[in-house]
Image (cartoon, rainbow, N blue to C red):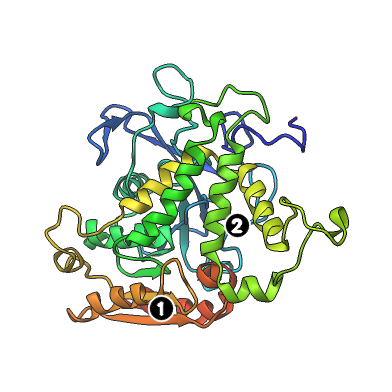
Amino acid sequence: MTSPDLLPVTGAWQPGDDPGNRQFFTHATDRRFALDAGVALRDVVVAYETWGHLDADASNAVLLCHAWTGDSHAAGAAGRGHPTEGWWDDMVGPGRPVDTDRYFVVCANVLGGCQGSTGPASPHPDDGRPYGSRFPVVTIRDMVRSQARLMESLGIRRWLAVVGGSMGGMQALEWAVMYPRRVRSLVAVATCMQATAQQIAWGAIGRRAIRLDPKWRGGDYYEADPGDGPGEGLEIARMVAQVTFRSDNVFTDRFGRELADTARVGDTFDMWQRFEVERYLEHHGDKLVRRFDANSYLSIGKAMDLHDVARGRGSLERAMARVVAPTMSVGIWSDMLYPAYQQQQIHEAIATRGVPSEYVEIDSPHGHDAFLINGDQLAAPLERFLGRAAKADL
């Protein structure tokens, strides 16, 4: 068992670990899975979880798409196999907005992830050693194509709804563009049609922090001893990202200019004396290192920066013209990472072509993370929207 003082080399789930509620589907066993990067993978594993029961006609299936450091555990308690409680636990379950008494809910860990799906920490089928630096660049579209293979294996022909926030919203949009006839409705929360230069800039800083950690070893660090992995680089990358997930007002109200280490130096100042906000950021960085993988952080972050529904489709207008599913786009007024205007753009791009679309805005000071924090504001619109989608094909 790793000492609590030593950061693990990776927080990735590994074959042989307790699966918890995960199920596993393997595809590309007889034919390779082609990626946008021009390479192909074989024996691709998708780790997923389900809640509820699939109707006889498979008409009640809802796909939840997770964000950057999420995984398949959208609902349920922390415990064996699951280091944290479900990332949307207050929204998914019996009688909740995504009602598992009515809907069959599926959530898959994305391709490139580290919680059971094929990613950089997974064993390479050629030699059983982690992919590491051999893992190719993946895109949001690659993630969606892998989910489509899972969909077919579950006997689902069409999703009642595809729902996602942040990077999950990118997947939801690509589902509606790539497979318009397989999506009956779409919920895109705190996301965008194209990553902006500033969003890419934030991601680039985090990638550089990991790359410059000498313990990253070019991506091949999995055989290192506990405490000798790229934990510091990943921690810094998470600290940078955490700043973008919340608003200035929240940081100011919670931490102000309070110093955390006053007892150490008394009335004098010390270069490494921390402010309370620094201690908060370090806490979140440490938490992520213990449950995530540095290479997966790089892989998924790059996919987000590459996200552009217009790529290879002529124009943004032509790409969004493929969306035929009624849509609910959700913005957050205080979101500095994916500002509300980006969700308004999604709504307008769909509504102007006569496809039913609505825009909902969360009134919260919590910034980007409000879609995970302020479920009270999202619950009623989401429940109503899914209810309408379920009745639409009756």
Which residue occupies the foreground of this view, 263 or 248?
263
Q: Which residue is mark 1?
A: 385
Q: Earlier in the sequence, mark 1 or mark 2?
A: 2
**Residue name at image x 32 percent, y 74 percent:** 327
Q: Amino acid at mark 2?
A: Gly
Q: Tell me if I can see residue 393 in this picture.
A: no
Q: Which is closer to the viewer, label 1 or label 2?
A: 2
Residue 201 in the image: state x and y as whole percent.
39, 55
In this rendering, is residue 326 above or below 147?
below
Residue 81 in the image: state x and y as whole percent.
64, 42
Q: Quadrant of residue 118?
A: top left
Residue 133 in the image: state x and y as whole percent.
42, 28
Residue 49 in the image: state x and y as whole percent.
51, 50
Near mark 1 (Cα within 10 A), the count class, few <14, some 14-19 or many ≥20, is: many
Q: Quadrant of residue 331?
A: bottom left
Q: Tell me if I can see residue 121 in this picture.
A: yes
In 3D space, how far apart are the residues under numbered discs 1 and 2 (Cα atoms)? 22 Å
Looking at the rendered structure, which numbered label has been put on residue 86? 2
Say what secondary structure mark 2 lies in. loop
Asked if residue 240 lies left or right of residue 176, the reply is right
Image quadrant for the N terminus?
A: top right
**Residue name at image x 17 percent, y 79 percent:** 353
